[in-house]
Amino acid sequence: PVCGQHAKCFNTNGSYYCQCVPGFQANAQTINFTAFTGVSCLDINECLDIQDVCGPKATCRNTMGSHNCSCTEGYISSTGQKVFHSNEEVTCEDECLDDPSICGEQGSCNNTEGSYICLCDPGYSNYGNAQARCIELNCDAFKTKGTSGQKLFTKADEILSSGPPGGGSQVSALLGSVENAMRLIGPQMKQNHTRMETQYTEAELQVWRQRAPPQGPLSMSGFAMAALVTYKGLESATNHSFPAPPSDRPGHGHSFQINSKVVTAIVSNPATEHLDKPVTFIFSHLQSRDGSVNYTCVFWDMRRGKGAWSTQGCRMVRSNSTHTVCSCSHLSSFAVLMSLYELKDSFQLQLITWVGLSLSLVCLLICIITFCCCRSIQGTRNTIHLHLCICLFIADLVFLTGISRTENRVGCGLVAALLHYFFLAAFCWMCLEGVQLYRMVVLVFNTTLRPLVMMAAGYGVPTAIVAISAIANAQGYGTDRHCWLNLENGFIWSFFGPVCVIIVLNAFFFIITWLLAHAEFGTASGSTCLRLNLSATFTVTAIAQLCVLGTMWIFGCFQFEARTLVMSYLFTILNSLQGVLVFVMHCLLSKQVREEYAKLLPCICPDLSQKKKYSELSSSQQASSS
């Protein structure tokens, strides 16, 4: 432009002149100028040049060629505009005068510099939010005169100091009264976070308040409150309040004991019987216990008779000897607690375990020595039996010495991993036995299996399974009760899955072997008939062996999960029988092994050998004299 920026050009007869547009002024003491005079237009800062250009209680903000006005905090414009111009004749008024109902019908508005405060009439409250409407207090649920937290818990101390409540109705009355009182007086606390502790109670309360009342079609008091109340010694008054039916009573038939303090959880919303997301609690145990106990999360159900513990809606997430994590889908007027019950092994069961497994270990050790030293039985089948006995021997030894050693978490996990590995290896070697029996019937010659193939199948497969399981879920090895696989999240199927597959495969091989052997008996020659008869005998012993070990782990599944006495006895007896069964079937019932034992017996007992020779000499003399 001829006149430059922010200037307007006016034409005259034979010439022109320039003037600055409104909001700008020339940098020289002149109004009219031309482009050759070197005058430029500069912005006028109305906020500095004109005093109170926007009026009182308003703030001026300069813009290029103009300015804007806005009311200071705590005031609003007379037109409702947030931004206006000084020539629009807009004034700033305080919020209390602009909206008389801003604090509600029973509240008075007190304007302050930049804000306002709502003062509520008696019987009304804005729950500590100074800018919220005053609403009526609903005191139907709690009619005591004292409204302070200290008075509340002092009164609770007076009740608990005279001894634990005598029955379920008294416990329900105490828990319900404290819950209702906390929901009423909690929002009245001046501090957002409050902690109170007396001789018999401990409470922690958190209140969240909005800075301003909620906007839109909402009906809220403008706060949220959560509190936890802990009672000291109340657990002794509720130790026997378990009148639930057997289906709702965990571990029916055992004794119960509360092993944590009683805790009541309270929130401002009273409708918490069905939460969309469960609430998690972590309880500290009053007594540290070993693996002989189970932990159950319960709550005080006031609807059950006069009040009793119930597990409905609560579940135990995880636990150890010192803490238990509970998850519950409700709060309401309930206390979330924890119960535990003893699971002591009887002396008879412990005796059977020690004696039976010791006998099994002795028999397996004899089998290992026999299979290593007897040259007459060396072969593929003997190699399979040798490694089967080694796996069972190590598994039984680890089971006997480490199944209950849950004190050290790492050590317990190692024991569980060893049991997982060697029991899987035992099943893999039994599967190889089924394959070998099948080859003995189908293949007349070259029925042996390569040692490398057997080692890969017998030890490589369980190594891969245990390695993958440990990488996927290392925490699954070891529980608080047993050094075995954790039953949660299906981790136990890393053992039972392969076992089921092996049992099905072995059953298939045994059935096919038996049918083929039975079909060939009628047309077989003498040597072939002997081979088939031997294969059938081996198959029967292998089936018996698989039945004992497979059935043992069927009962073992219930043993570690349900812990019933019958399952415990069956699992222990079958676990003790497997070593004896292997010794009887593969050693005592084998003619070759018996002959080797007969040769070895004189070396061990020379006196017995002398008596045998004397008996033979006497018999020969009698025969010659006659």
Image (tube, helix red, strand yellow):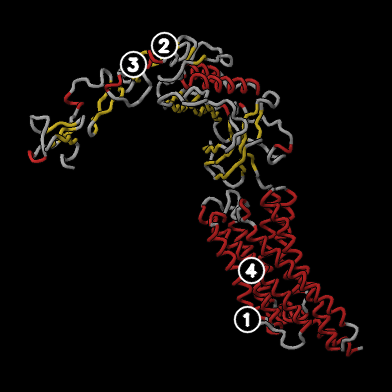
Which badge, 4 or 1, comes first in the chain's sequence?
4
Tell me the kind of residue under disc 3.
Glu
Instruction: Answer left or right for 116 relative to 439.
Output: left
Please give the residue where the numbered disc 3 appears in the rendered image: 93
| Res. 339 in view | no
Q: Real-space Cα distance between discs 4 and 1?
A: 15 Å
CB of mark 3 within 8 Å of CB of mark 4? no
Give the camera-side residue of 370 and 134. Answer: 134
Which quadrant is home to the C terminus?
A: bottom right
Label 1: how many Cα within 10 Å (few below 14, some 14–19, many 20+): few
Please give the residue where the numbered disc 2 appears in the rendered image: 108
Give the camera-side residue of 258 and 282. Answer: 282
Which badge, 4 or 2, comes first in the chain's sequence?
2
Q: Residue furthest front?
A: 13
Q: Real-space Cα distance between discs 1 and 2?
A: 95 Å
Numbered label attached to residue 430: none
Tell me the kind of residue under disc 4.
Ala
Q: Real-space Cα distance between discs 3 and 4?
A: 87 Å
Q: Label 4: state its secondary structure.
A: helix
